Structure formats: C-alpha cells, structure tokens
Image (tube, rainbow, N blue to C red):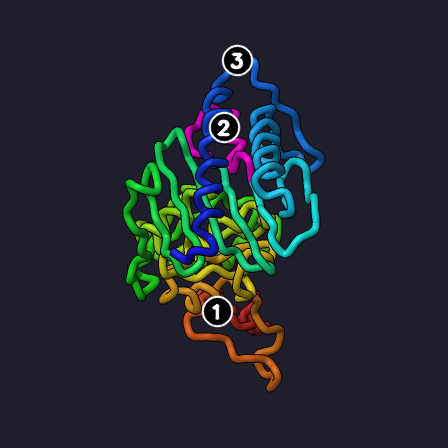
Amino acid sequence: MPTSFTDDLRLAHVLADDADSLSTNRFKALDLHVVNKPDLTPVTDADKSVEEGIRRTLSRARPRDAVLGEETGSTGHSQRRWVVDPIDGTKNYVRGVPVWATLIALMVDDEVVVGCVSAPMLQRRWWASKDGGAWTGRSLLKASECHVSDVSRLDDASLSYSSFSGWDERDRLDAFLALSRRCWRTRAYGDFWSYMLLAEGAVDLAAEPELELYDMAALDVIVREAGGTFTSLDGTPGPTGGNALASNGRLHDQALAFLGSLPDDEHDPDVAPRRHGSLHDLSARRRPPVAPPADPSDEE
C-alpha cells in the first residue's frame, strides 16, 4: 500500500478498535438511551459516545485534519477530512440485530483514500487504501484480499438493497422493481453489508436512493479497490451524489439503464437514446394492450 496512507490506515484501525469496544459494551444494554432526530431516524447514546471517542483521538493524532461526523456535523478546515458514521445500522442496533458497523474514511481533496468498516458483532472488518487493495479480516496482519465478482449478465446477478420505502418515496420503486425482476436474486442485506458483500464477490449489485456522505465514503474506496464501481444514480463517480449504485463494474451500465435518469423525450436529438433493456423497454412490454373503441352498431 502507498506509504503516504499507511499510517492513516493504521490510525483508522485504532479508531475502529476503540469504537468496537464502546459500541459492543452498549449493545442490548437495558439502559440504552434512544431518541429520534429531526429526520425521525433514531440515535443512541452509543452513537454519540463512539463519535466523541473518535473525535478525541483524531484531535490528538491528526489535529490539523477536518472531521465530518453524523452526530456532530463538520469541524475544521483542511484538504484532509475524516468522515465518520459511528453506527451505521442504528435501527438494527436498537432492536438487537447484530448487523451494524462503524464507518471511518479519510478524504483528501474530496477523494476517499482510506476506508475502514468494522462490524464487531459479525466479527468482521473490511478496509482499503488508495492503490493498496481492499481487505477483510480481524487485523492488518490476518487478512485476505477482496475481489468483486466477474458476473456480466443481469440474469445471473445478485442485487442487494435496504428497503422499498426509500425508492417508493422518490417515485423510483417501479424502476427498482424492474431491475430486480431482471436479476437472478435479490436480498435486503442492507446498509454497509450490501457493499461489503459486493466487495467480496458474494453480491454483484447494491443500490440505495438516498444516502449521506458519511454513509458512503468508507464503502466507496473499499468497493473500488476490490475492483468494483461506485457512483451516484446519475453515474457520477464517488460518494457525493446523495445516493448510490455499486457494482462489480461489468454490470454498472446495465443497472444504470434502470436506475439512472431517463431522458424525457426519446426523439430529442440532444438526449442520449435509451439503452437496450431499460425500464422504458420493460414497461412498454408490461403495459396492457389498449382495447379498440366499441362499435356503436354492436350496442343493443
């Protein structure tokens, strides 16, 4: 891995170790304090403690770096910015479901160069650094490299997602369902896990219609370093578009044909033509035939 990010990646592991200690200690605690934020998503005392702990360590180890965290927002001004989601999967956390993780990333000039995802109750951790590959294991010394799958047809692909409601709220459920019908298999692994399974080659596509930077930054570099592609739903590379489509790379354009922005006028010469196999094609095939008007002479 590049020497310039080796120390940053080691620090990300230290931050993850401390986060795991705090989050596992409060998991299923009888006195866990849960409140709803203004957006009606839950936050626990564990979320806040984990982020506070990470910020304290960063203030000592990287005092000049900026930090963006889900619970406390953005602090500092620097080309180097740490992006933290203290507990990704808080709804799972509060219900006792063990699928949740701490996401830690470092961005330099708006490019994610280090990412670490730690899921202590699954006893799994994933990490990557720019040009250093993507890895999974329990430590830097005991790890195996991650590689995306080589599936090239949607008919053979496994698609993971979080829920239908987000797609429905944004009038994109029909598009998502059309894609799911073309895929071999769909499963709602949800949150970070969809993307880590993709990086390992167990899943071929993952998508969500609304996400924040702290939800995606660590996932982005891990997927890319595993050989995959990570973009927003309009095809813009990276984790800054407010939503996500991740793939093994081979399937990306095919999935974008369903989930990406569709042109308003297929006859407009300034608009790119719809790609074969798009939602437009499928919806036209599914549309019931229009019955001819009744002949008045047939009426009694």
Secondary structure, mark 3, is loop
Query: Which residue does the image show at 36% across and 61% down from the upper left?
Result: 227
Q: Give the range drawn in magenta.
A: 85-100
* 10 Å crowding of disc 3: few (<14), some (14-19), many (20+): few
* 10 Å crowding of disc 1: few (<14), some (14-19), many (20+): few
CA separation in Å, label 1 and label 3? 53 Å
Q: Mark 2 points at which residue?
A: 93
Q: Residue 51 carries which label?
A: none
The image shows a total of numbered marks equal to 3
Q: Considering depth in this image, is 104 or 209 the residue closer to the camera? A: 104
Q: Considering depth in this image, is 169 or 282 the residue closer to the camera? A: 169
How far from the left and from the top, in percent, is residue 239? 55, 56
Residue 288 visible to an observer of this rendering = no
- Whether 238 is among the magenta residues is no
Q: Name the residue under label 1.
A: 284
First in sequence: mark 1 or mark 3?
3
Above/below status of 233 relative to 125: below
How far from the left and from the top, in percent, is residue 146? 32, 52
Q: Name the residue under label 3.
A: 30
Above/below status of 87 relative to 134: above
Query: Which residue does the image show at 40% across and 31% down from the upper left?
Result: 120
Please indicate whether residue 110 sits to the left or right of residue 184 in the image.
Answer: right
How far from the left and from the top, in percent, is residue 298? 54, 70
**In which quadrant will I find the N terminus?**
bottom left
CA separation in Å, label 3 and label 2? 13 Å
Query: Which residue does the image show at 61% across and 50% down from the upper left?
Result: 81
First in sequence: mark 2 or mark 1?
2
CA separation in Å, label 2 and label 1? 42 Å
Above/below status of 44 relative to 178: above
**In which quadrant will I find the C terminus?**
bottom right
